[in-house]
Amino acid sequence: MKIVVTGFGPFGGEKINPSWEAVKALPNEIGGAEIIKHMLPVTFNGVRKMIPELIVKERPDAVILTGQAGGRSNITVERVAINVMDSAMPDNEGYTPEDEPVFEDAPVAYFATIPVKTIVKALREAKIPAVVSNTAGTYVCNAAMFTALHTIEVSGMTTKAGFIHVPFSHEQALDKPRPSMALETIREGLEIAIRTVIGDLTKND
């Protein structure tokens, strides 16, 4: 079994991105599955190019994308990605889309195909704050989730995919108080999420 797990590089003036810091600290094997880790650029064009290439190359059983959601105090498992790019803040290439589709002639939205509520339940049982989120925003994280699900759909693959947002790390909250979570807790949460996805895939075999 093969699981692709991605995080993002820093953006918005931050020195780190806790999503990638947690992903790169994951073991290379979890529950018998090979874990393939990739850092994505915080650019709309970058994720729309890299994610399809990654999925087609690796043909994984599941894709778990992760990103930073500053201001959230929980690990939030996204339920839906929408076909729109709209942001007042430029991405790391300076691109600021307004009311643009992620892909022309694509559905208005895709639901995550990983077990969203089961993941949240497993995290909360491990005493890690977690909730279901019904909006991945309209920035690069949403574009990444939509791209992954759209790629899988049009390729006719059975790969499961979804997106998990994580809070700021404690390091990022040192200078300006804001909701944060220890990086080790974020890493542990992602490992639990991966194990839950593996369990779901195995159950459905």
Image (spheres, grey):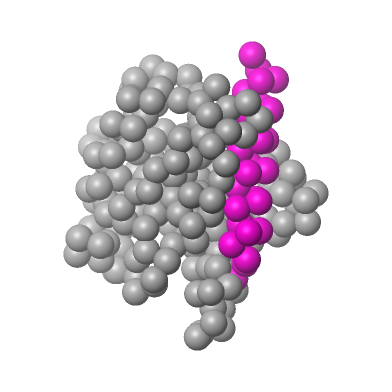
Left or right: 178 as drawn, with respect to 83: right
Instruction: Look at the image and say whether residue 204 sits in the magenta stretch.
Output: yes
Image quadrant in which the N terminus is located: top right
Spot occupied by residue 89 in the image (x, y as percentages of width and height): 29, 68
128 versus 182 height, above or below: above
Q: Is residue 186 visible?
A: yes
Q: Which residue is drawn at 58% across and 27% down?
A: 33
Q: Is residue 107 visible?
A: no
**What predominant SS class does the magenta segment belong to?**
helix
Left or right: 37 as drawn, with respect to 33: left
Q: Which residue is drawn at 27% across and 62% down?
A: 91
Q: Residue at x 78, y 51 (%)?
A: 126
Image quadrant in which the C terminus is located: top right
Spot occupied by residue 132 in the image (x, y as percentages of width and height): 63, 50
Tell me where residue 197 sits by quadrant: top right
48 versus 176 height, above or below: above
Left or right: 182 as drawn, with respect to 96: right
Which residue sits furthest top? Answer: 205
Which residue sits furthest left? Answer: 94
Spot occupied by residue 127 in the image (x, y as percentages of width and height): 78, 56
Instruction: Look at the image and say whether residue 87 sits in the magenta stretch.
Output: no
Q: Which residue is drawn at 66% across and 51% down?
A: 188
**Tally of numbered discs:** 0
| Residue nearest the observer in this picture, 110 or 171 | 171
91 versus 5 height, above or below: below
| Residue nearest the observer in this picture, 179 or 87 | 179
The span picked out in magenta is 180-205
Spot occupied by residue 195 in the image (x, y as percentages of width and height): 66, 35
